[in-house]
Every structure is written in C-alpha cells, then in structure tokens.
Image (cartoon, grey):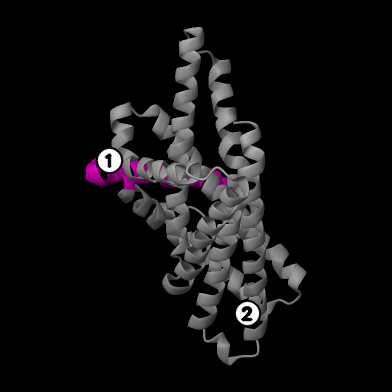
Amino acid sequence: MVLEALINPITAEKTPYKMLLLGILYSTVGIFLSIWIFKDQASLIMVFLTVMAVLPLVYSTFKLEEYKDAHESGEMHLLKEHSKALTLLIFLFIGFVISFSAWYVFFPAELSSIVFKTQSQTITSINNKILGNAVQFDTLLKIFFNNLRVLIFCFLFSLVYGMGAIFILTWNASVIGAAIGNFIESALSSYTQKFGALTTATYFSAISLSIVRYFTHGIPEMASYFIAGIAGGLFSIAIIKKHYLTAKFPQIMFDVSGLVTISILLLGVAAAIEVYVTPLFF
C-alpha cells in the first residue's frame, strides 16, 4: 500500500517528471525484492513486482482518461488531454529504463547475468533476426511488423486484462535497460583497452552514446505502445461501465480509433529511424 499511494493520477498528470523518480523507485524495489526472494527467477519476478507497484496508478489514470472521453467533447481537446497521460507514462518508462540499465552496470557481472538472464536472451534473439536480413527495406518491414505485433498485444492486453499492457511495457523497459547496460559496459571496456583508465568523460561519453543508440527510435516506439495501451484501456473501461448502451459510446470508439491510428503512424516513424538514421552513427 505504501508505494501505490505515493501519487494520484491528477497530480501525476500535472507533474509528470515525478514519474521518472517513481519509475526508478518502483523498479529498484522490484529488482532487490526479486533477488532477495526469487534470485534464480529474478529476470521475470522483478518485472511482475514492478508492475504490481505501478498498477493502481495506471488503472486510475486510464479511468480518468475514460471519464474525459465520456464527459468532454472535441477531438483535438481530447487528444490534448490524453497527451497528459501519455507524458506521465513515458516519464515512468524512462525511469524504469534508467533503473534497469544502471543496476545492470553496477551489479557484478555474475549477478547481472542472473538478474537479466531472460532479457539478454531476448536481445540476442532479436539481434540475430535483424542481422539475418541485409536489405534495408526488408529490415524495415520486419522491424515494423514485429513491433506492430507488440502494439496489438498492448491493445489486447489492456482490453482483456484491463491494465495488461503495463506488463509488456515494463518488460520492454527491462530489455532496453539490459541492452543499454551492456552497451555501456562494452564501451567502457573498449575505452579501458585503448586508454588504460576510465575518466568522468569516458563515462559521460558511454552513457550519451547509449542514449542516442536506443532512445532515438525508442521514445516514439514506446510512445506508440503507450497510446495503444491507453486506447485499449479506454475501450475496456467503457465496456465495464456499459457505455455501449449510451450515446457516449460512438465518441469513445472514435477516440479509440484515432489513438490506434496515431500509434501505428508513430510505430512506422520509429522503425524508419531505427533502420535509416541510427545506423549512420553506429
């Protein structure tokens, strides 16, 4: 009850930057509890514990967004209101990524390999699939449709399980955190071999490169998943409240359709950045 009562959705939407700190706190608690209680299965347990901490806030946020759909009008006004929820979720996600990547780097190699075992296996699998396709446009299609599958899962999980999308998004945060952590470690190892010692500048360079490498396309990609999750959550709550029996339902469905369309467009932009822009620097 302590973690879930730290902030309410109205305050979170007004001060979304606080969600970054809460994201770090929630995931850090999840990591250490999983190591303490379920060390061998920590890579998945920490995701579940993090989701448990953030679930009440996300559910309350989706309820607030559905209330806006049912009681306010004007598509542009509603999109502006929904953008507040999107912003707080993105800050929360970034907080997760910062925490997961920082602990990946700070933990001893043996502990990191246990805590992020499943995430590392997922990264290897994804890299092998992408490297197996040398044609850029084919790679773009492969990345887009793979990410589209995740987006559909986010929508369906939110629709069927209410807040189910937050599990997929927290899992993705742990995978990206492990990838960033591994990138930073590799960069620091390379600097050590070349210059023999690490300085503040080398740490700053490694962290900056990792941010550019993964956040350039990661932010629009995660935003698209969050938007799909919000759309599924709105639809789910509308069904629970039986708004399909009222005149408000067409407006809600129109809003849900608009959010899904925006999420797919953002996903295409993220895939294009990942294929055509990121390789220019890495």
Distance from disc 1 to disc 2, alpha carbons, whole Å, reads: 43 Å
Identify the main secondary structure in magenta. helix
**Tag nearer the camera, 1 or 2:** 2
In this view, the residue farthest toward the top is: 196
**Residue that badge 2 annotates:** 253
| Residue 20 is covered by the magenta coloring | yes
- The stretch of residues the image draws in magenta is 18-43
Q: In which image quadrant can residue 94 be found?
A: top right
Task: Locate residue 170, reporting x and y percent.
Answer: 45, 52
For this rendering, which residue is in front, 108 or 5?
Answer: 108
| SS at badge 1 | helix
Q: Nearer the viewer, residue 134 or 81?
A: 134
Residue 221 on image: x %, y %: 59, 52
11 versus 35 height, above or below: below
Circle 2 crowding by C-alpha within 10 Å: few under 14, some 14–19, many from 20: some
Residue 24 in view here:
no
Q: Find numbered disc 2 in the image and state the secondary structure of the residue it sits on.
A: helix
Q: Amino acid at mark 2?
A: Met
The quadrant of the image that shows the N terminus is: bottom left
Q: What's under tag 1, amino acid-wise?
A: Ile
Q: Nearer the viewer, residue 190 or 232?
A: 190
Q: Which residue occupies the extreme bottom position in the image?
A: 245
Which mark is drawn over residue 35? Answer: 1
What residue is drawn where x is 27% and y is 40%? 35
Q: Position of residue 34 (x, y in %)?
A: 29, 45
Q: Quadrant of the C terminus?
A: top right
